[in-house]
Amino acid sequence: MVISNTTTANAILNSPRNIGTWLQRAWRFNPMLVLLVAANLVLLAVGLIGLAADPRTVLNAPVWAKTTKFSISIILYGGTLLWILSHIKSRPRVAQFVANGTGAILLLEMGLIVLQAVRGVPMHFNQATPFDTVVWRTMSVTISIFFMIDLIGAIVLLREKMADRVLAWSLRLGLLVALLGMVLAFTMSVPTAPQMAALQTGQTIDMMGAHNVGAMVDGQTRMLPFLGWNMDGGDLRIAHFIGLHGLQVIPLLGWLLSRRATGLREGQRLALVGVGAAGYTGLVGVLFWQALRNQSIIAPDALTLLALVGLVAGVAVAGTLVVRVGRRAQAA
């Protein structure tokens, strides 16, 4: 059942006083995404217990670390997507298709990740046995379908007419940046140079693809606690992670500008959303570029620091100009 009016749909974000009412409205809009978030809340609890009680490691990381990280990300992703899709009024069936497809695929993905955690084996790139190969290829195919489904949602959202243009563009840009983050994930499945060399000589390899860049093998470097990011060289997960969570950051910026920045004209607020989205996308690009150069996130060189400083300065200058030009126009 699709929520029938904008007021009811927007109530999904606007924190009703009664949590039961909030859940009821969310369930009426799409039960699948609610189930996705609820299931991952349970898996988050399981992961935290596992981190405390299970001493096993996979690739030198706690076996339950990845399930815990993925649960947190999917809770945020599913809850945010539920709110975003509720703004699609012109194509309600498409909104439901995107919600149901996303929920079903991510439930399957998490089920497979938990299965591999229980078995105590690597969850990604693993083709050590025929069973592991089937699991990994299933995850690869379903995540590609997931990307296409959410791309459909982004296209429909771009065509949707909304009364609040500031919020509308923040939702669109947030979903587009998240899609960019998904695209970056596909670069991890490309065989590394050592893996390619082994394949060319006819060898059988247990792992196809990697998070780390260059010849460094996943699990054989120093890693940031819990996150597991490579501290000795480039790690493609960082830009992927930051890109995905543009789905929360950019809409939050739009929502704040729409609700709080009442002293700014609509054109100014729209421009600030654009500046924020451009700056966030630039950050994703710098982090991806840094990883491709096989550089650790904790040891940026002068070139990376210069790019980051330039990005921050550009965003600050653009934002300041938007506000000042708008004020001068109002004064005139």
Image: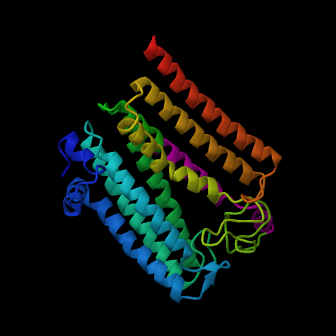
Front-lying residue, 287 or 310: 310
Indicate whether 260 appears above or below 139: above
Indicate whether 301 appears above or below 228: above
Quadrant assignment, res 193: bottom right
Front-lying residue, 223 or 217: 223
| Bounds of the magenta segment | 175-201
Where's the C terminus, which quadrant?
top left
Indicate whether 289 appears above or below 78: above
Residue for point 37% across, 51% down: 81
Can you give x and y, in whole percent of width and height, for residue 172 in the image? 43, 39
Can you give x and y, in whole percent of width and height, for residue 178 in the image? 50, 48
Quadrant assignment, res 166: top left
Can you give x and y, in whole percent of width and height, for residue 285 in the image? 65, 44
User: What is the count of numbered marks?
Assistant: 0
Residue for point 61% across, 34% down: 316
Residue 223 within the magenta-colored segment of the rendering: no
Residue 184 within the magenta-colored segment of the rendering: yes
Can you give x and y, in whole percent of width and height, for residue 227 in the image? 61, 68
**Predominant SS of the magenta segment:** helix
